[in-house]
Amino acid sequence: MAKIGNIDVGEFPLLLAPMEDVSDPPFRALCKEQGADVVYTEFISSEGLIRDAAKSVMKLDIYEKERPVGIQIFGANLDSMLKSVEIVEASGPNIIDINFGCPVKKVVSKGAGAGILKDIDLMVSLTKAMVEHTKLPVTVKTRLGWDHDSIKIVEVAERLQDVGCKAIAIHGRTRAQMYKGDADWKPIAEVKNNPRMHIPVFGNGDVNTPERAVEMRDKYGLDGAMIGRASIGYPWFFKEVKHYIKTGTHCAPPTMQERVEAARRHLQMSIDWKGEKLGVFETRRHYTNYFRGIPHFKEYRMKMVTSDDSKDVFAAFDEVLEKFGDFEFSH
Ligand SMILES: Cc1cc2nc3c(=O)[nH]c(=O)nc-3n(C[C@H](O)[C@H](O)[C@H](O)COP(=O)(O)O)c2cc1C
């Protein structure tokens, strides 16, 4: 059984990775329904939060049904991080997660995200201060290191644990790799194999089939899998992994009815949560995967991703169900 602080997250939990403009409340709810054990918000700027920037504050919203949920924040300034811990706490998450892994330039150049991998002492002291500032469990998501020559993740993870971090999720790439090449899970296994480590060590990066998740558990001995891209437009991935873990067989992929129903609910929840315009716009990125594998689908996908009016998108869903209702999906 893995535990994040006092939160029991089950045996080999599946965690929905924090993903900007993806891991919002509607999508997190869909993933939760399909078996995600822990979900995370996208990263939220501590500087934005303390300035009450509306966009950052909105990202703090959580639905009761998605718990346990972690709110992820990023920043490199101690004061701002501590103030934002208080703001985050007020919105009642179960976990506060620190992003020490984002590789994008605008974040890294300020020393935040993966930028902090160049200053491990600061990474540790920020974590310590945040742990001391809240009663909620603080977790960390990070990468293997800044670049290939500076991988010290075993030592880093142990130091984070020693200052009270309650779980660590490690993406098996360095900052220098961005998203290139394959994720390397060996160094993550080394973190787990450190006899001093007792907090859960979650693996992340390229878990894109149920077999890969099982490999992460059995071959690399990790405590859970954090899943990102494989779930975009495919919240059933969590269910499929769980089924495979339990039975060693693949469950049938979702039917067209289930896909259309999920897409409809996704869009409706998004509109309810962030309004018609943003709701229509930000749900678009999921449709390719919701309907992947259907031949000659372009015409319908275009209808879904070009209209600004939700009525047109809902009508496109109806049309798809009518035309392809009997389509048999394969994995
Ligand atoms: C669209 C997108 C947005 C992301 N945003 C975040 C984020 O806000 N915070 C974070 O820690 N990682 C973020 N990531 C990284 C993912 O959490 C994850 O580490 C990475 O995608 C590797 O896992 P995967 O192979 O399962 O996708 C993002 C990744 C993607 C694809």
Image (cartoon, rainbow, N blue to C red):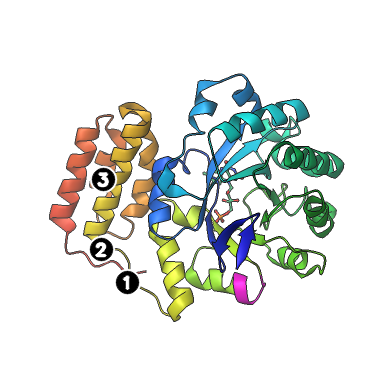
Nearer-the-camera pick, 294 or 240: 240
Q: Secondary structure at mark 2?
A: loop
Does the residue at mark 1 contact the one at mark 2 (Cβ under 8 Å)? yes
Figure quadrant of the C terminus: bottom left
Q: Is residue 280 visible?
A: no
What span is colored magenta in the figure?
216-221
C-alpha distance separating marks 2 and 3: 14 Å
Type of amino acid under label 2 = Thr
Q: Residue at x 67, y 42 (%)?
A: 135
Q: Return the x and y of residue 329 as percentages of the image width and height.
A: 28, 66
Type of amino acid under label 1 = Ala
Q: Secondary structure at mark 1?
A: loop
| Label 2 CB less than 8 angstroms from ligand 1 | no
Q: Which mark is residue 264?
A: 3
Find residue 171 and report its image quarter.
bottom right
Determine which residue is flagged by label 2.
255
Q: Return the x and y of residue 303 as percentages of the image width and height.
A: 24, 39
Task: Count how many numbered circles sit on residues in the image.
Answer: 3
Find residue 257 and report its image quarter.
bottom left
Q: Residue at x 72, y 63 (%)?
A: 188
